[in-house]
Image (spheres, helix red, strand yellow):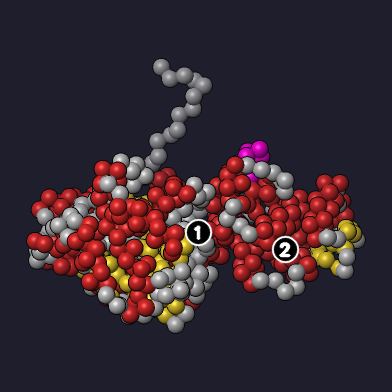
Amino acid sequence: MESPSRARVPAASPAGAERRREAANGRLSLDETIAIIDIGSNSVRLVVYENLSRAPAQVFNEKEMAGLGRGVATTGMLAPDAVEKALAALVRFRILCEAMHVGRPRVIATAAARYAENGPDFIARAEAAVGQPIEVISGDREAYLSALGIVSGFDRPRGVVGDLGGGSLELVGVDDDGIGEGVSLALGGLALMDRAKNSIKAAEKIVRGDLGTLPQLAAMRGRDFFAVGGTWRALATLHQRQTGYPLNVMHGYTIPAREAKEFVRVVERADSTMLEAVEEVSSARRPLLSYGALVLDQIIKRGRPRNIVISAHGVREGLLFGELPEAEREQDALLRGAQDYNQLRAREPRHAADLIAWTDRIVASAHPNDDPALDRLQQAACLLSDIGWRAHPDYRGEQTLNVIAHASLIGIDHPGRAFLALTAFHRYAGLKATAVSADGLRRLLAPRLLERVQLLAAIFRVAYLISAGMPGILPRVPVSCEDDRLVMRLPEELRSLASDRVAGRLKQLARLLGRSVEIA
């Protein structure tokens, strides 16, 4: 017999389920869910996105390491066991898409299906399994979509994109003028292993010959190399562990080229049994690490880039970005993502617009010739400033820091992430608060940015105390620097807001600005 003290959740009726589906707090949309199924040479992956937007959030991400590209370079055929594994994954992905109410998944196939003699037969069976037409993309289109993925995921990227898959490597330039001409080479991890007959020495000779003097390498000199693909992300994971890096996020992780070169050479020469024991990397990807390191080593040697920048965006995100209207493509990805967090998590999303204007007034009066890049981060900080309110007051600071530091934000580098996370941390925990996670992120910021973190947090601590996070108050209580004073002007009907706590926080803010306080 069930205890009377325990309430039972009533079974959902179909009508009730549909009502909840329409309401669905925590999701921006349920009607626009889209999916991309990527049949690659190493893995078959399903990614479901909440909607088509400038900053799409992933609802679901699943893969099957089918290894379709294994042996294609030498036999010209997709292996039967890999084919069956891929087909089973596609049936499973079709069922999952139906459960998530995906309208029509986009399905693409890359190098393995493109080059194999039995590729057309596999595609026919795959279309029957997934219930959708499949686009077998060319090497040139794969390079273009990878570059488009970089454009979507970074703020004004300039350099060369390299997308290393299981079957091929695509190289293509990207800058303010657009996307350059791409090239596709049979240097993917599985293809290179096959061609070299599992010999790293032979593989090095092949890579040197294939890379030669490509114009894409010449365009890389002194610029960034954007590394796309699971094997390179796995190498970056190892590098983070080795260096004790404080932010476990791959997208935007940047390694100076000289440091990356030394690291990948260590991986190249590592004993295969040692790589097999690396727990941070999936067992299916470990054998490819030394080949991925070899390719990156040769790219660095010939291209002489400034930095290696790891990207979580690639072909799939490029497909989505290509479908956006031009006006949405021009949106700032960071600010759009921060707006989404504000819409989903703030107590009153409309308050953010008041806070942006209120903060702008204070900062502009104190720093009239401010850096535009700081203005962008300042807006994002305002949008993210109230997303932690549901947490217990004792833990809001650290919890919000971790949410923002590891959020699926794009168009921002790692120092920018640290800036936003630390601003929210000090807004909740206080300007003098410390925490292990916060101390680690401070390592990523220059002193000037740390000072701005303190300033914004101090501004927010005043703003939320007088507005309670609700719109309509801040515009009526302007604060700005006037000569050597920080002046808050209160209308008669709001003068009671000037409590001792407000005055104390205002003095704290004034000290950071080197000014005295006046409440008028």
Q: Is tag 2's residue or tag 1's residue first in the polypeptide sequence? A: 2
Position of the C terminus by quadrant: bottom right
124 and 400: which is toward the camera: 400
Furthest-bottom residue in view? 177
In the picture of the structure, the residue carrying the numbered disc 2 is 359
- Residue 502 is situated, as x and y percent measured from the top left of the image, at 82, 50
- Tell me which corner region of the image, top left, top right, bottom left or bottom right, holds residue 209: bottom left
- Residue 90 is situated, as x and y percent measured from the top left of the image, at 22, 54
**Whether residue 5 is visible:** yes
Q: Amino acid at mark 2?
A: Thr
229 and 494: which is toward the camera: 229
Local secondary structure at mark 2:
helix
Q: What residue is rendered at 47% in x and 62% in y?
A: 256
Q: What residue is rendered at 63% in x and 45% in y?
A: 397
In the picture of the structure, the residue carrying the numbered disc 1 is 409
CB contact under 8 Å: marks 2 and 1 = no
**Is 6 above or below relative to 258?**
above
Left or right? Give the position of 496 relative to 6.
Answer: right
Position of the N terminus by quadrant: top left
225 and 463: which is toward the camera: 225
For the stretch drawn in magenta, what is the main secondary structure?
loop
Q: Amino acid at mark 1?
A: Leu
Local secondary structure at mark 1:
loop
Q: Residues within 10 Å of mark 2 (few under 14, many from 20)?
A: many
Q: What span is colored magenta in the figure? A: 390-397
Q: Residues within 10 Å of mark 1 (few under 14, many from 20)?
A: many
Q: What residue is rendered at 57% in x and 60% in y?
A: 416
- Residue 6 is situated, as x and y percent measured from the top left of the image, at 49, 24
- Residue 64 is situated, as x and y percent measured from the top left of the image, at 25, 50
Q: What residue is rendered at 21% in x and 52% in y?
A: 66
